Image (tube, helix red, strand yellow):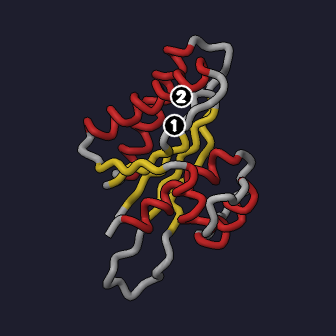
Amino acid sequence: MIILGIDPGYERLGIAVIEKPQKNSSHSKKEVLLYSDCFKTSSKIDFKERLSILGKEVERVIDVYKPEHLAIENLFFQNNQKTAMNVAEVRGAILYIALSKNISIKEFTPLQIKVAVAGHGGSDKKQVADMVCRLVKIEKEIINDDEYDAIAIALTASAVIR
Protein backbone atom coordinates (compact mmCIF):
# COMPACT_ATOMS: atom_id res chain seq x y z
CA MET A 1 0.00 0.00 0.00
CA ILE A 2 1.36 3.41 -1.00
CA ILE A 3 0.84 6.45 1.26
CA LEU A 4 1.55 10.06 0.32
CA GLY A 5 2.36 12.28 3.31
CA ILE A 6 2.09 16.06 3.01
CA ASP A 7 3.25 18.77 5.40
CA PRO A 8 1.33 21.69 3.85
CA GLY A 9 2.92 25.05 3.23
CA TYR A 10 3.28 27.47 0.36
CA GLU A 11 6.93 28.43 0.77
CA ARG A 12 8.00 24.90 1.70
CA LEU A 13 5.83 21.84 1.10
CA GLY A 14 7.01 18.60 2.69
CA ILE A 15 6.24 15.57 0.53
CA ALA A 16 6.90 11.91 1.31
CA VAL A 17 5.81 8.63 -0.23
CA ILE A 18 6.07 5.43 1.77
CA GLU A 19 5.12 1.87 1.06
CA LYS A 20 3.42 -0.04 3.85
CA PRO A 21 4.21 -3.75 3.69
CA GLN A 22 1.39 -6.24 3.17
CA LYS A 23 0.15 -7.95 6.35
CA ASN A 24 1.02 -11.44 5.09
CA SER A 25 4.27 -10.42 3.41
CA SER A 26 7.36 -12.47 4.15
CA HIS A 27 9.44 -9.38 3.41
CA SER A 28 10.31 -6.57 5.77
CA LYS A 29 7.63 -5.43 8.19
CA LYS A 30 8.98 -1.87 8.11
CA GLU A 31 7.68 0.86 5.88
CA VAL A 32 9.89 1.78 2.95
CA LEU A 33 10.52 5.39 2.01
CA LEU A 34 10.06 5.64 -1.76
CA TYR A 35 10.42 9.41 -2.10
CA SER A 36 10.73 12.56 -0.04
CA ASP A 37 11.38 16.20 -0.73
CA CYS A 38 10.88 19.70 0.55
CA PHE A 39 9.38 21.45 -2.45
CA LYS A 40 9.98 25.19 -2.38
CA THR A 41 8.37 28.15 -4.09
CA SER A 42 9.77 31.67 -4.34
CA SER A 43 8.29 34.54 -2.34
CA LYS A 44 8.83 36.66 -5.45
CA ILE A 45 6.00 34.81 -7.21
CA ASP A 46 2.34 35.78 -6.72
CA PHE A 47 0.54 33.45 -4.29
CA LYS A 48 -1.91 32.18 -6.94
CA GLU A 49 1.03 31.12 -9.12
CA ARG A 50 2.70 29.45 -6.13
CA LEU A 51 -0.51 27.55 -5.46
CA SER A 52 -0.58 26.36 -9.08
CA ILE A 53 3.08 25.26 -8.93
CA LEU A 54 2.46 23.35 -5.68
CA GLY A 55 -0.62 21.67 -7.12
CA LYS A 56 1.29 20.55 -10.22
CA GLU A 57 4.07 19.09 -8.05
CA VAL A 58 1.59 17.15 -5.93
CA GLU A 59 -0.12 15.86 -9.10
CA ARG A 60 3.28 14.83 -10.51
CA VAL A 61 4.11 12.82 -7.39
CA ILE A 62 0.66 11.21 -7.41
CA ASP A 63 1.04 10.28 -11.08
CA VAL A 64 4.46 8.72 -10.47
CA TYR A 65 3.74 6.80 -7.23
CA LYS A 66 -0.03 6.24 -7.46
CA PRO A 67 -0.76 6.40 -3.72
CA GLU A 68 -3.93 4.87 -2.31
CA HIS A 69 -3.96 7.22 0.66
CA LEU A 70 -3.07 10.86 1.33
CA ALA A 71 -2.04 11.76 4.87
CA ILE A 72 -1.99 15.48 5.58
CA GLU A 73 -1.45 17.60 8.64
CA ASN A 74 -4.47 19.52 9.91
CA LEU A 75 -4.08 23.24 10.05
CA PHE A 76 -3.58 24.52 13.55
CA PHE A 77 -4.21 28.13 14.49
CA GLN A 78 -1.26 30.41 13.92
CA ASN A 79 -0.68 33.98 15.06
CA ASN A 80 -0.34 35.22 11.49
CA GLN A 81 -3.81 35.04 9.93
CA LYS A 82 -2.56 35.66 6.39
CA THR A 83 -0.13 32.74 6.66
CA ALA A 84 -2.85 30.51 8.12
CA MET A 85 -5.26 31.42 5.33
CA ASN A 86 -2.67 30.73 2.62
CA VAL A 87 -1.76 27.36 4.15
CA ALA A 88 -5.49 26.56 4.33
CA GLU A 89 -5.77 27.31 0.61
CA VAL A 90 -2.81 25.00 -0.12
CA ARG A 91 -4.49 22.26 1.93
CA GLY A 92 -7.74 22.80 0.03
CA ALA A 93 -6.01 22.49 -3.34
CA ILE A 94 -4.23 19.30 -2.25
CA LEU A 95 -7.43 17.79 -0.86
CA TYR A 96 -9.22 18.59 -4.12
CA ILE A 97 -6.45 16.94 -6.15
CA ALA A 98 -6.55 13.80 -3.97
CA LEU A 99 -10.33 13.56 -4.12
CA SER A 100 -10.35 14.06 -7.89
CA LYS A 101 -7.97 11.08 -8.18
CA ASN A 102 -10.04 8.91 -5.78
CA ILE A 103 -7.35 8.88 -3.09
CA SER A 104 -8.47 8.22 0.47
CA ILE A 105 -7.64 11.11 2.83
CA LYS A 106 -6.42 10.88 6.42
CA GLU A 107 -5.93 14.08 8.42
CA PHE A 108 -3.85 14.32 11.59
CA THR A 109 -3.12 16.97 14.17
CA PRO A 110 0.48 17.76 15.11
CA LEU A 111 -0.20 16.10 18.48
CA GLN A 112 -1.39 12.86 16.83
CA ILE A 113 1.70 12.79 14.62
CA LYS A 114 4.09 13.33 17.53
CA VAL A 115 2.41 10.61 19.59
CA ALA A 116 2.37 8.12 16.69
CA VAL A 117 5.99 8.66 15.67
CA ALA A 118 7.85 9.69 18.83
CA GLY A 119 5.51 8.30 21.49
CA HIS A 120 4.90 11.63 23.21
CA GLY A 121 2.79 14.64 22.28
CA GLY A 122 5.38 17.02 23.71
CA SER A 123 8.13 15.79 21.37
CA ASP A 124 10.11 18.49 19.62
CA LYS A 125 11.14 18.60 15.94
CA LYS A 126 14.50 16.95 16.64
CA GLN A 127 12.92 14.05 18.53
CA VAL A 128 10.43 13.47 15.70
CA ALA A 129 13.23 13.61 13.10
CA ASP A 130 15.35 11.16 15.14
CA MET A 131 12.47 8.69 15.35
CA VAL A 132 11.70 9.04 11.64
CA CYS A 133 15.32 8.02 10.95
CA ARG A 134 14.88 4.95 13.15
CA LEU A 135 11.60 3.94 11.54
CA VAL A 136 12.58 4.21 7.87
CA LYS A 137 15.83 4.01 5.98
CA ILE A 138 16.74 7.43 4.58
CA GLU A 139 19.48 7.37 1.99
CA LYS A 140 20.02 11.11 1.56
CA GLU A 141 20.65 14.15 3.67
CA ILE A 142 17.47 15.93 4.70
CA ILE A 143 17.90 19.64 5.32
CA ASN A 144 14.39 20.94 6.05
CA ASP A 145 12.12 19.81 8.89
CA ASP A 146 9.19 19.91 6.46
CA GLU A 147 10.53 16.78 4.77
CA TYR A 148 10.88 14.91 8.09
CA ASP A 149 7.39 16.09 9.00
CA ALA A 150 5.94 14.72 5.74
CA ILE A 151 7.57 11.33 6.41
CA ALA A 152 6.20 11.40 9.97
CA ILE A 153 2.71 12.19 8.66
CA ALA A 154 2.87 9.27 6.22
CA LEU A 155 4.09 6.96 9.02
CA THR A 156 1.20 8.10 11.21
CA ALA A 157 -1.25 7.09 8.49
CA SER A 158 0.50 3.77 8.09
CA ALA A 159 -0.05 3.06 11.78
CA VAL A 160 -3.82 3.57 11.53
CA ILE A 161 -4.57 2.12 8.09
CA ARG A 162 -5.37 -1.58 8.19
- Mark 1 lies on a secondary structure that is loop
- Circle 2 crowding by C-alpha within 10 Å: few under 14, some 14–19, many from 20: many
Q: Identify residue type, mark 2.
A: Val
Q: Residue at left 66%, top 67%?
A: 131
- If you read the primary sequence from the N terminus, does the residue marked by circle 1 or circle 2 appear first? 1
Front residue of 117 and 115? 115
Q: Is residue 130 above or below residue 82?
A: below
The image quadrant where one finds the N terminus is bottom left
Label ID, residue 87: 2
Front residue of 108 and 161? 108
Q: What percent of the width, then of the height, locates residue 148?
A: 64, 53
Q: Are marks 1 and 2 in contact (CB under 8 Å)?
A: yes
Q: Is residue 115 above or below residue 72?
A: below
Front residue of 145 and 73? 73
Q: Is 88 displayed left or right of 148 in the figure?
A: left
Q: Is 105 displayed left or right of 88 in the figure?
A: left
- Most extreme residue toward the bottom, as rendered? 26
Q: Residue at left 53%, top 63%?
A: 33
Label ID, residue 131: none
Q: Which residue carries the number 1 mark?
A: 75
Q: Quadrant of residue 62?
A: top left
Q: Residue at left 61%, top 14%?
A: 45
Q: Quadrant of residue 136?
A: bottom right
Foreground disc of the pair 1, 2: 1
Q: Identify residue type, mark 1.
A: Leu
How far is disc 1 from disc 2 in space, using C-alphas? 8 Å
Q: What percent of the width, then of the height, locates residue 146?
A: 64, 45
- Mark 2 lies on a secondary structure that is helix
